[in-house]
Image: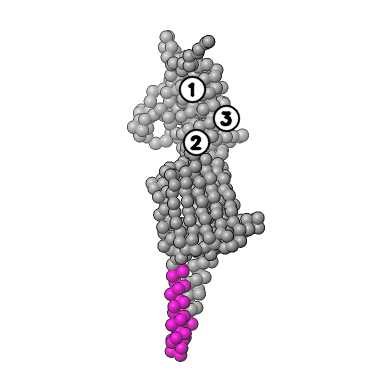
């Protein structure tokens, strides 16, 4: 019989085993791929680079179009230190070299480089330096900066090695992919928001404006009948009241969809419950909400679930003729399942390809797939409909 001891983590200055190094690289790459928001991706890249290369400080700069940085993320610098440093740096000196040249920069002491200039007095003291551009084809997306490798040696020497440079180059290549994906996600989300605003504008015109026009005509008819046919005039005035109530309902429902959801402050469950309570009061149909064990999900998933719920509720309340709509959010492993069920007239799913864009199904499927989820639609003529969205654990 034989036994083995677990591998000991390498101490400062020690070289990790090949398997440990590979595991560290894998962990860093997986961490970058898990995020969809650009800000989260930038922070993960910076923290991963600092941890992987055992540096005291790390930063990632994204250039703007005016000679400065649109974003500059740091890791290893406290909030107090960062406030003391002051405004974001400009593209000058060694920072500019990373953004305007394609090669890496590895320096034994950045302070002795002729391009070292303009560093604020509150900036942490830095010596050995490793910089790497993050490029996508001919475009420079940003640059990674590392300083002060934490590897004390008996003679006091240290510094980044050629192997460190190659490792950072590999990380930068995957960082470019992660950043590009995050940017595409945010752009697609902006387009979806623009489409939703356009749809709401059409809804306001088609529903509210038409009801107001009908209300005006009915009021005019009532005015002409007051003297010669009071009974009919009374009926027309009752119709005016009904049309005005419907227009108010349409406006309230539109306001709910236009109002930004306070997901960051209130979370998905509270936001959904509040909006559904408003819809229940604004519409003749009974609208209910039931949460079964869901507490908090990743921000991107919460936003996607909320928007899908809003779209499905919009369809059920405006187009299906439903008398009841039930919304259920339930926990499923580390993820969640959202169901919106109505008892309306239903439809044949195989026949809504052309109507899919009108019904918002394309947008809903896009939102679900954008967060690694899945959307399914169950319906039949006369049997209502169920929209189900599943998201994995984050």
Q: Position of residue 216 (x, y in %)?
A: 48, 76
Q: CA distance from mark 1 to mark 2?
A: 18 Å
The residue at 65%/58% (across/down) is: 351
Q: Position of residue 239 (x, y in %)?
A: 46, 77
Q: Secondary structure at mark 1?
A: loop
* Dot 3 alpha-carbon crowd within 10 angstroms: few under 14, some 14 to 19, many 20 or more: some
Q: Secondary structure at mark 2?
A: helix
Badge nearest the viewer, 2 or 3: 2
Residue corresponding to mark 3: 173
The residue at 48%/16% (across/down) is: 6
Give the residue furthest to the front.
1
Say left or right for 141 vs 109: right
Q: Earlier in the sequence, mark 1 or mark 3?
A: 1
Q: Which residues are magenta?
A: 219-247
Q: Position of residue 255 (x, y in %)?
A: 44, 60
Q: In the rendered view, tell whether residue 390 sits above or below residue 46.
A: below
Residue 358 falls inside the magenta stretch: no
Predominant SS of the magenta segment: helix
Residue corresponding to mark 1: 53
Please report contact status of discs 1 and 3: CB closer than 8 Å, yes or no: no
Q: CA distance from mark 2 to mark 3?
A: 14 Å
Q: In the rendered view, tell whether residue 58 sits above or below residue 260.
A: above
Residue 230 falls inside the magenta stretch: yes
Q: Which of these two is toward me, 3 or 189?
A: 3
Q: Earlier in the sequence, mark 2 or mark 3?
A: 2
Q: Secondary structure at mark 3?
A: helix
Q: Earlier in the sequence, mark 1 or mark 2?
A: 2
Residue corresponding to mark 2: 41
The residue at 54%/29% (across/down) is: 29
User: Is residue 58 among the parts visible in the rendering?
Assistant: yes
Say left or right for 32 vs 355: left
Please report contact status of discs 2 and 3: CB closer than 8 Å, yes or no: no
């Amino acid at each position: 019989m034989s036994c083995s001891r677990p591998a000991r983590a390498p101490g400062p200055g020690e070289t990790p085993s090949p398997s440990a190094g590979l595991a560290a690289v894998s962990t860093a790459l997986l961490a970058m791929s898990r995020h969809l928001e650009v800000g989260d991706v930038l922070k993960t890249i910076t923290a991963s680079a600092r941890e992987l290369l055992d540096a005291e400080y790390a930063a990632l700069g994204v250039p703007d179009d005016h000679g400065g940085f649109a974003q500059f993320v740091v890791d290893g610098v406290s909030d107090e230190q960062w406030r003391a440093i002051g405004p974001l740096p400009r593209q000058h000196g060694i920072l500019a070299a990373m953004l305007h040249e394609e090669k890496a920069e590895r320096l034994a002491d950045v302070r002795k480089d002729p391009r070292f200039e303009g560093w604020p007095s509150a900036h942490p003291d830095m010596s050995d330096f490793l910089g790497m551009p993050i490029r996508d084809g001919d475009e420079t997306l940003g640059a990674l900066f590392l300083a002060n490798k934490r590897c004390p040696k008996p003679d006091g020497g240290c510094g980044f090695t050629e192997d460190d440079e190659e490792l950072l180059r590999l990380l930068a290549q995957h960082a470019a992919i992660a950043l590009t994906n995050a940017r595409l996600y945010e752009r697609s989300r902006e387009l979806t928001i623009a489409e939703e605003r356009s749809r709401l504008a059409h809804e306001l015109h088609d529903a509210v404006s038409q009801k107001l026009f009908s209300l005006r005509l009915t009021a005019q008819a009532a005015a002409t009948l007051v003297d010669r046919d009071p009974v009919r005039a009374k009926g027309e005035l009752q119709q005016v009241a009904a049309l005005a109530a419907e227009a108010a309902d349409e406006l309230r429902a539109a306001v709910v969809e236009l109002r930004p959801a306070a997901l960051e402050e209130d979370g998905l469950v509270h936001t959904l419950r509040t909006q559904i309570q408003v819809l229940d009061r604004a519409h003749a149909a009974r609208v209910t909400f039931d949460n079964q064990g869901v507490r908090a999900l990743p921000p991107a998933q919460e936003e996607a679930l909320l928007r899908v719920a809003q779209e499905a509720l919009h369809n059920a309340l405006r187009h299906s003729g439903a008398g009841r709509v039930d919304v259920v959010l339930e926990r499923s492993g580390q993820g969640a399942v959202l169901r919106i069920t109505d008892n309306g007239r239903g439809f044949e799913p195989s026949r809504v390809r052309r109507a899919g864009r009108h019904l918002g199904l394309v947008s809903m499927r896009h939102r679900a797939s954008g967060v690694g989820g899945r959307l399914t639609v169950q319906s039949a003529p006369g049997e209502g409909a169920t929209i189900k969205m599943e998201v994995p654990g984050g």
